[in-house]
């Protein structure tokens, strides 16, 4: 079955490359979608707790069987043939019970698999319905799930519809709010590899120009700051020089007054 899928997808992409217009393809990440839905996470946690209880029960039963086996081996020389047979029958019975219990809980049709399927199925239905809406409204040829079976060895982020799927699911769960057309309108226009590379180059050039403008603005601001600092330093030096002259003149006048006073006192 997987081989058929691989051949199908290989043929699909070969056709996409050789076709005149190519195919319009997108994908969704189911694991990511499930992780973003609180109801699923809560129910999944509860199921995991229950599964842990089942595993603990299995370990307890297995330990009981191991203890009986050890007891039988230790006491075998002292037991009669009938008692040995009784203990072996009991061990065999408990082992069969354990096998049945393990299959009941974790088998192919066991409780864990069934409840897990019941847990995921409603969300998968919502995802499927949302994919139908998007596929029909945006004319996609194929929408894949990003999984090992789909053989998506590489998937460009621009083709990921997971966020839009989540918006549609949340809208449907609330029963009102944003219109489907408004949500789907958020999907970027489908781009070929060449167009995506061209747009990416334009974005890089735009970012480079913005960085250059930012650098120019920062250089201009730095230059203005240097001029302000230089002007402030010049004013500070001028103030200190003027203050030094005033202090010097004051000291000279004081010396003159002291000299005159001393001369008068000596006369």
Image: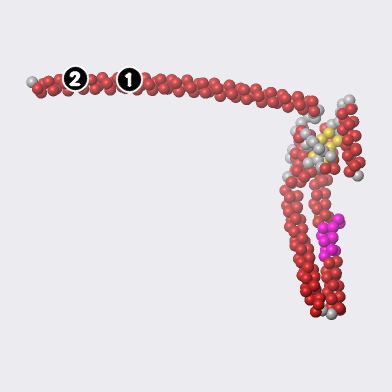
**Magenta-highlighted stretch: main secondary structure?**
helix
The residue positioned farthest toward the left in the image shown = 267
Residue 46 percent coordinates (x, y)? 74, 56
Q: In which quarter of the image is residue 178?
A: top right
Q: Residue at 54%, 21% (x, y): give it.
A: 220
Gap between marks 2 and 1, in whole Å? 21 Å
Residue 181 in view of the camera: no
Q: In this view, does 17 lie above or below 27?
A: above
Q: Which mark is residue 152?
A: none
User: What residue range appears in magenta?
Assistant: 97-111
Please give the residue where the numbered disc 2 appears in the rendered image.
Answer: 256
* Residue closer to the observer: 126 or 1: 1
* Residue closer to the observer: 105 or 135: 105
Q: Earlier in the sequence, mark 2 or mark 1?
A: 1
Residue 62 percent coordinates (x, y)? 78, 65
Residue 44 percent coordinates (x, y)? 75, 52
Magenta highlight on residue 135: no
Q: In which quarter of the image is residue 184?
A: top right
Residue 103 percent coordinates (x, y)? 84, 60
Quadrant for the N terminus in the image = top right
* Residue closer to the observer: 176 or 4: 4
Residue 106 in view of the camera: yes
Q: Residue at 81%, 38% (x, y): give it.
A: 153
Q: Residue at 84%, 76% (x, y): give it.
A: 84
Colour approach in the figure: secondary structure
Q: Residue at 86%, 78% (x, y): give it.
A: 81
Q: Quadrant of residue 21?
A: top right
Crowd class of label 1 (few under 14; some 14 to 19; many from 20; radius 10 Å): few
Please give the residue where the numbered disc 1 appears in the rendered image.
Answer: 242
Q: Do the residues labelled 2 and 1 touch (CB within 8 Å)?
A: no
Q: Is residue 67 above or below residue 111?
A: below
């Amino acid at each position: 079955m997987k081989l058929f899928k691989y051949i199908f997808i290989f043929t699909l992409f070969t056709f996409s490359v050789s076709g005149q217009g190519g195919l319009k393809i997108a994908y969704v990440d189911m694991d990511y979608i499930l992780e973003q839905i609180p109801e699923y996470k809560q129910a999944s946690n509860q199921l995991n707790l229950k599964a842990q209880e089942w595993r603990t029960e299995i370990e307890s039963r297995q330990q009981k069987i191991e203890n009986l086996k050890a007891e039988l081996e230790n006491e075998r020389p002292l037991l009669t043939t009938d008692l040995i047979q009784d203990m072996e029958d009991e061990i065999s019975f408990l082992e069969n019970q354990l096998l049945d219990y393990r299959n009941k809980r974790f088998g192919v049709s066991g409780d864990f698999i069934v409840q897990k399927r019941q847990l995921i199925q409603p969300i998968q239905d919502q995802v499927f319905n949302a994919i139908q809406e998007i596929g029909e409204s945006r004319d996609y040829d194929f929408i894949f799930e990003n999984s090992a079976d789909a053989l998506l060895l590489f998937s460009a982020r621009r083709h990921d519809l997971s966020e839009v799927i989540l918006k549609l699911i949340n809208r449907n769960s609330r029963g009102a709010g944003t219109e489907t057309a408004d949500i789907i309108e958020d999907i970027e226009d489908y781009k070929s590899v060449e167009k995506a590379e061209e747009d990416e180059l334009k974005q890089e050039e735009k970012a480079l120009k913005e960085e250059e403008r930012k650098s120019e603005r920062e250089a201009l601001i730095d230059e203005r700051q240097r001029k302000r600092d230089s002007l402030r330093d010049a004013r500070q030096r001028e103030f200190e020089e003027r203050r030094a002259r005033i202090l010097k003149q004051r000291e000279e006048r004081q010396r003159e007054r002291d000299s005159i006073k001393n001369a008068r006192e000596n006369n």
